Amino acid sequence: SCYDASAGGAGGCPYAPGAAGNLATEDLVYLLDGMGISHDVRLSGVLEAARYISTALGRPVESKVGQAGGWDPLTGSPTDRP
């Protein structure tokens, strides 16, 4: 199967006013992990890429996993990162 997503949810159609944008890859990976569906994507790597993209574009991360902050989505443990 093939799924279309982008790190941080960046992108989307600029010509569609009010469009929600793309599905964030980190949200998709987190969902697949939770459902026990195997894949070859490291959530930590996607989160790192999304943070980089967010900083480079000067825009907040659009993903739910990225917005959660304060916890490690891989372990469920609190972190010192906002």
Image (cartoon, rainbow, N blue to C red):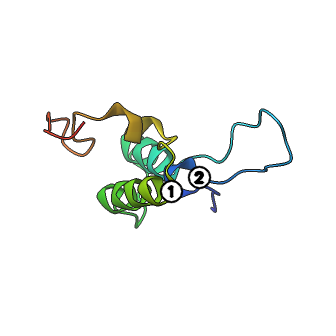
User: Residue at horizontal 43%, vertical 62%?
Assistant: 39
Q: Are marks 1 and 2 in contact (CB under 8 Å)?
A: yes
10, 65: nearer the viewer: 10
Amino acid of disc 1: Ala
Residue at 40% x, 62% y: name it.
Answer: 49
- The residue where tag 1 is placed is 7
Q: Is residue 65 left or right of residue 28?
A: left
Packing grade of label 2 (10 A; few <14, some 14-19, many >=20) is many
Q: Residue furthest right?
A: 15
Does residue 62 sit above or below 4 in this rendering? above
Q: Please, is residue 46 above or below residue 22 in the view?
A: below
Q: x, y (%) of residue 74?
A: 24, 46
| Callout count | 2
Q: What x and y, as percent, mark residue 42? A: 34, 62
Q: Residue furthest front?
A: 58
- SS for callout 1: helix
Q: Which residue corresponds to the image point at 42% horizontal and 55% vertical from the top-left? A: 55
Going by the numbered disc 2, the residue's amino acid type is Ala
Q: Which residue is label 2 attached to?
A: 10
> Hey, which quadrant is residue 50 in on the image?
bottom left
- Residue toward you, 15 or 68: 15
Numbered circle sitting on residue 41: none
What x and y, as percent, mark residue 38? 41, 58
3D distance between C-alphas at marks 1 and 2: 6 Å
Quadrant, the C terminus: top left
Label 1 packing within 10 angstroms: few (<14), some (14-19), many (20+)? many
